[in-house]
Image: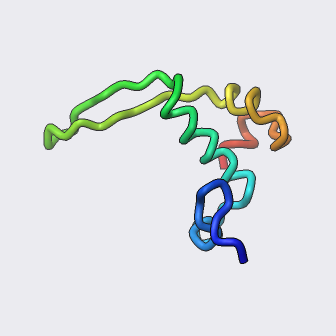
Amino acid sequence: MRFSVFAYSQEKLLEYGLDVTDALILDWFANFFIGKMEKRIFKDSSDNAKIFGWVKISKIMEDLPVIGITSEKGIRR
């Protein structure tokens, strides 16, 4: 068995019940996060900085038509 798909361990993907489509979405998100994504830094109750980002589901559908998801419900699983 090949160890990884889109830089994610196949063993871990299976452990978490994820498939190749999920791996592709994770890969897209990781690349988007280090790129143009709007990010904000918040501090938690312990004064630790946490970085949060926002993504429109429609952007995933627009960028990844190959996955065949045509509604937001298809991604929210």
Q: Position of residue 18 (x, y in %)?
A: 66, 61
Which residue reaches farthest left? 46
> In this view of the protein, which residue sits in the foreground, 36 or 70?
36
Q: Is residue 9 left or right of residue 65?
A: left
Q: What residue sits 75% from the left and 42% below the top?
A: 74
**What residue do we see at 74% from left, 30% from top?**
63
In the picture, measured across the screen, residue 22 lies left or right of residue 48, that is right
**71, 55: nearer the viewer:** 55
Q: Quadrant of residue 72?
A: top right
| Residue at the image position 78 percent from the left and 34 percent from the top | 71
Quarter of the picture containing the N terminus is: bottom right
Marker count (numbered): 0
| 2 shown above or below 67 | below
Provide residue 59's location: percent of width, then percent of height: 68, 26
Q: Residue furthest bottom?
A: 1
Give above or below for 2 relative to 70: below
Residue 19 position by quadrant: bottom right
Residue 35, image x, y percentages = 52, 28
**Residue 31 versus residue 39: which sits nearer the camera?**
31
Query: Seen in the image, is 49 located left or right of residue 61?
Result: left
Residue 56 percent across, percent down from the top left: 61, 26
Colour scheme shown: rainbow
